[in-house]
Amino acid sequence: MTGNQYLLAGQSSELDRLQLQARVWEPAGRRLLADIGEGRGARALDVGCGAMGWLRVLSEWVGPDGEVVGTDIDDGMLSTADQFVAAEELRNVALMKDDLFASDLQPESFDLVHARFQMSPLGRAQEQMESYVRLVRPGGVIVLEDLDIGSWHFNPPPTPALDELIARLRDVFEQWADPHVGRRHPELFRSFDIEASVRADVQALPPGHPYLWLPFQFAAGLDGALRSLMDAEKLEQLKAQAETELQQPNRWGTTFTLLQSWGRRAK
């Protein structure tokens, strides 16, 4: 994977996964923005907004007098996001194609810069942070969100196939990306003289919740990478066994941990 490629780019299942993901984590986004404080009239940026991202929660936060800009490098994502913005009548939201590592956005032009799940799949954390610091105004806020899979479980145990499938997905991300970067957020902020606050959020998923199927959505998008690490027949057997486990009555689960870090650039 080259330095500016998204690990799951080009997968047909990715649009649906990102839309579901955005809805699952919207409450956590709203709680975080409430902690940050009043945003009315602010100009906010959602980097790599994908199909939905933080567009709705930021639109609410900045209010009718503010502006939200959502960026992505993928035309398909932007097209879907445009449909979402139109359907939700988010009149204070604008979308544009932009490469995080060669951004055309004006420096120091945003009061808040948000990036969710950008560092884990893209890497180049220091370069990403340099971009965010460059784009935010002095006194403005940078928000980073990344995952930690330590809490990703299915209940009641045992669920050996589901557990192994998650472990194999972790192996893929460790080989091509950085699934642990969220743990280093405070250190990364400090390297730019920013003191970070951190919070963590885990969702309990009741039986039948569509987000319980996330391992299979990841496995579909990362099929080639998984097959490079394990025998194709064994992979299919593993997925079939995991699906049988998931479909057991009263199967519920907990998500990965969403690590949220934020801090203000010095004035």
Image (cartoon, helix red, strand yellow):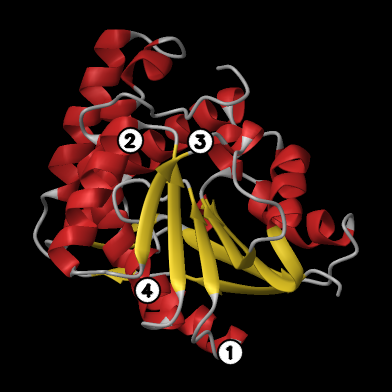
Q: Which of marks 3 and 1 is nearer the N terminus?
A: 1
| Mark 3 nearby-residue class (10 Å; few <14, some 14–19, many ≥20) | some
In space, the residues marked 2 and 3 are separated at their CA atoms by 10 Å
Residue 170 numbered mark, or none: 3
User: In the displayed structure, does residue 133 sit left or right of residue 157?
Assistant: right
Which residue is labeled 4 in the image? 59
Q: How far apart are marks 4 and 3 (CA)?
A: 33 Å
Depth order, front residue of 165/83: 83
Work out how far the residue at label 1 is from the one at label 4, CA to CA, in angstroms.
Answer: 15 Å
Q: Which of marks 3 and 1 is in front?
A: 1
In the picture of the structure, the residue carrying the numbered disc 1 is 37
Label placed on residue 218: 2
Q: Look at the picture and state if 42 lies above or below 229.
A: below
195 lies above or below 225: below
Secondary structure at numbered mark 2: helix
Name the secondary structure under disc 3: helix
Q: Quadrant of residue 97?
A: top left
Query: Sequence-wise, which precedes: disc 2 or disc 3?
Result: 3
As displayed, is residue 224 above or below residue 52? Answer: above
- Marks 1 and 2 in Cβ contact (< 8 Å): no
Q: Residue at x 61, y 43 (%)?
A: 119
Residue 70 relative to residue 217: left or right: right
- What residue sits 61% from the left and 84% below the top? 36
Q: How far apart are marks 1 and 2 (CA)?
A: 35 Å
Does the CB distance between marks 2 and 3 fall below 8 Å? no
User: Mark 4 vs mark 3: which is more N-terminal?
Assistant: 4
Residue 155 visible in the picture: no
Frontmost residue, 129 versus 200? 129
- In the rendered view, tell whether residue 9 sits above or below residue 136: above
How far apart are the two marked residues, 3 and 1, measured between alpha carbons? 35 Å
